[in-house]
Image (spheres, rainbow, N blue to C red):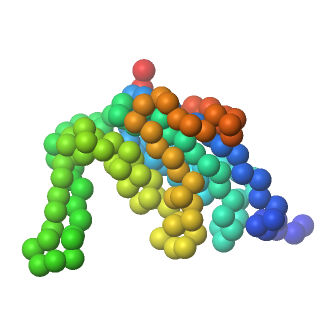
Amino acid sequence: MKTFMAKPTDIERKWFVVDATNIPLGRVASQVADILTGKNKPTFTPHVDTGDFVIVINSDKIVLTGNKLVDKKMRWHTGYIGGLKEIDYGTLMAKNSPKALEKAVKGMLPKTSLGRKQITRLHIYKDANHNHQAQKPEIVEVKGARN
C-alpha cells in the first residue's frame, strides 16, 4: 500500500463560516487553524498547502475565561530603544477583536512560508455581515461552544 501525497494540482478548496459567539478564544483559534492547514481532511499532507478558506463572524462576542481580560497582555517591540509596548486583552478586544483572534490563529500555524500563505485565507469580521456570499460558504459548528 502506498502513502498518499497530495499535489498542489489536486487540491480543492472550500469556504467555511465559523460563528464565534460565546466561544473561548483558544477554542475558536485551534479549530480555525486546523481548517486553514487542512488537518480536517483525509488528504492532509504536511508539506503541501491543503487548507480551506475560513470566514469568522462575530469576533466581538468571543469570550476569554477567568481573569484573562485583565491579566493577559499582548506585547510587541517597535524596534527602537525602550520600544516595548503592551496592551491588555480587555482593551484589545474592545478596540480590535479581529486582531486578537488573528494573533491566536497565527501562533498555531507553521512558522514557515507555508504558514504565511495559510493565514492569508483567514477573513475575520466583527459582526455577522460578510461579503463572501458568492463563494457559498458552509457553516461549521465549533466543538465545545458555551450556551
Compared to residue 128, the image places residue 7 above or below, namely below
Where is residue 44? Give x, y as percent.
70, 59
Q: What residue appears at the point 18 percent right and 48 percent down from the top-left corner?
A: 88
**Callout count:** 0
Residue drawn at x 66%, y 43% is: 15
Picture layout, residue 102 above or below residue 27: below
Q: Is residue 58 visible?
A: yes
**Between residues 125 and 118, which one lies in front from this camera angle?**
125
Residue 23 appears left or right of 39:
left
Instruction: Please tell me which residue lies in front, 1 or 111.
Output: 111
Specify whether 102 is left or right of 116: left
Q: Residue at 48% of width from left, 48% of height from top?
A: 30
In this view, the residue in front, 45 or 49, is: 49
Q: Identify the image quadrant of the C terminus.
A: top left
For residue 103, above or below residue 61:
below
Classify residue 27 as left or right of residue 53.
left
For this orientation, the residue located farthest to the top is: 147
> Which residue ends up furthest to the right in the rendered image?
1
Q: Where does residue 25 sit, x and y in percent of width and height?
A: 38, 42
Q: Is residue 69 visible?
A: no
At 16% from the left edge and 63% from the top edge, which residue is drawn? 85
